[in-house]
Image (cartoon, helix red, strand yellow):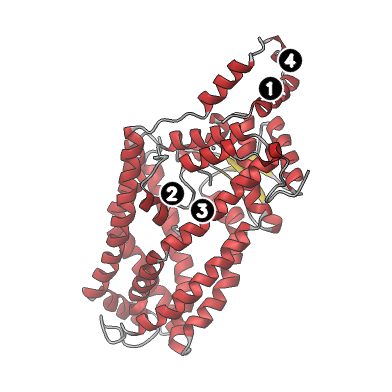
Amino acid sequence: MRTLLRIGLALAAVITAAAIVSSLTVTASAQPRLTPEQEKQRAEKRVTYKVTDEMVRHSRIRDILYFAGTAYSLGVLLLILGTGWARKMRDVAERIARWPYVAAMLFIAMFTIVDTLLEFPLAYYSGFVLPHKFDLTEQTFPAWLWDFTKELLIGIVVSAVLGGLVLLAMRRIRRWWLVVWIASIPILILIVVVVPVFIDPMFNKFEPLKDQVLKQRLLDLASKAGIEGSRVYEVDKSKQTKTMNAYVTGIGPTKRIVLWDTILAKMNHDELIAVMGHEMGHYVLKHMWKGLAFGFVVSFFVLLIGQKFYERGIGRFGIRAPGDPASWPWFLVVVSVLFFFLTPVLSGYSRWQEHQSDIFSLELTHDNVSLASAFVKLTEDSKQNPKPPAFIEFWRYSHPSIARRVEFALNYKPWEKGEPNQLWKGK
């Protein structure tokens, strides 16, 4: 359980935005008209960012935590195996429950608690200390700990049920990797459907968007993008973070547009429209389905190769046979290492999808400056380095760097050259 937006001048877009504002507010017409040069200066100011020492320092710490945290997590798993704790927990679970599946569930529940306690110092630093150090949250420790506990409880239930089934398949089926891979497809799709309406509300309050003007503009934009029947929600994420986000989520009856209250407070309507154009691009371009399909292809090879490495652990660490509950930490080691080395592939695919959504938003709104301005606010607000080292961006960035996104947003204008759109096929 534990594992969207990241941008020159468009004078016509600024004038159009000003016209919209003047039609919505009575006092707008009384304000002095800006000269073209003043409009240009205002636009340049909106999309100008500065790489600060704080951004570089915060990003560097997060990068170190990523690599060090991966090594630490693997070390914890090997510690549980090497000390014999896995074998002892298995023996306890089998004494309590005679049925193999129930014993496996009990083992995974105990293992998850032990693993979480051993990894808690890192989780505490990265999830609580670091955001407070860089003024990215005002959440109290009791509130953070309660969210952490809820994640743990959900993780115990889900991992025990699903992990128990994986161990059962290992025990009874020679090519268990294929069965596990096939079974994962409907399960992950079900999770995508269920999470927005059952899991997310356990952490935050979702309610209909209060700003009726913005709501109507978003619904009009969704209709223009080809998304019908959407519901727009705002969520009280400010109780956990000062950073911003917005997204389109769910499938079928759970489809919804969600905006964090932080982004509603910090971005103007035009920026929000540009951001949501990006998110709607994900939906219209079926990135969720394509991403799942890509993930299934990757997991196919991970499980195929993983079975071979997993079986090399049989007879070690007190592991008696395939499907032995004590083998669960070893299985996680194998899968984690394989996915770690595939991270650049997964990150590269994600960056490609994010770039497509940037294109979609620009073609849908023609508001280059607002999208670029939104990206600038996002990087400044999250204190993320807009120009990360090339290796870091290649290895772990799920979005193109902000510097790349701002430059692209300001320069992509095929409509000015009479060229056809790449992705949005409307008019």
* Real-space CA distance between mark 2 and mark 1, rounded to the nearest whole angstrom: 42 Å
First in sequence: mark 1 vs mark 3: 1
In front: label 4 or label 1: 1
First in sequence: mark 2 vs mark 1: 1
Residue, x 43% and y 87% (percent of image)?
171
The disc label shown at residue 351, or none: 3
Image coordinates for residue 73, horizontal then vertical, percent = 31, 62
In front: label 2 or label 3: 3
Residue 104, quarter of picture: bottom left
Q: Residues within 10 Å of mark 1 (few under 14, many from 20)?
A: some
| In-image side of 97 versus 251 (left or right) | left
Residue, x 75% and y 49% (percent of image)?
425
Q: Quadrant of the C terminus?
A: top right
* Real-space CA distance between mark 1 and mark 3, rounded to the nearest whole angstrom: 33 Å
Circle 1 sits on which residue?
18
Name the residue nearer the viewer: 205 or 248.
248
First in sequence: mark 2 vs mark 4: 4
Q: Residues within 10 Å of mark 3 (few under 14, many from 20)?
A: many
Image coordinates for residue 294, horizontal then vertical, percent = 55, 66
- Determine whether label 2 and label 3 are within 8 Å by CB: no
Q: Amino acid at mark 2?
A: Asp
Circle 2 sits on which residue?
147
Circle 4 sits on which residue?
26
In front: label 2 or label 1: 1
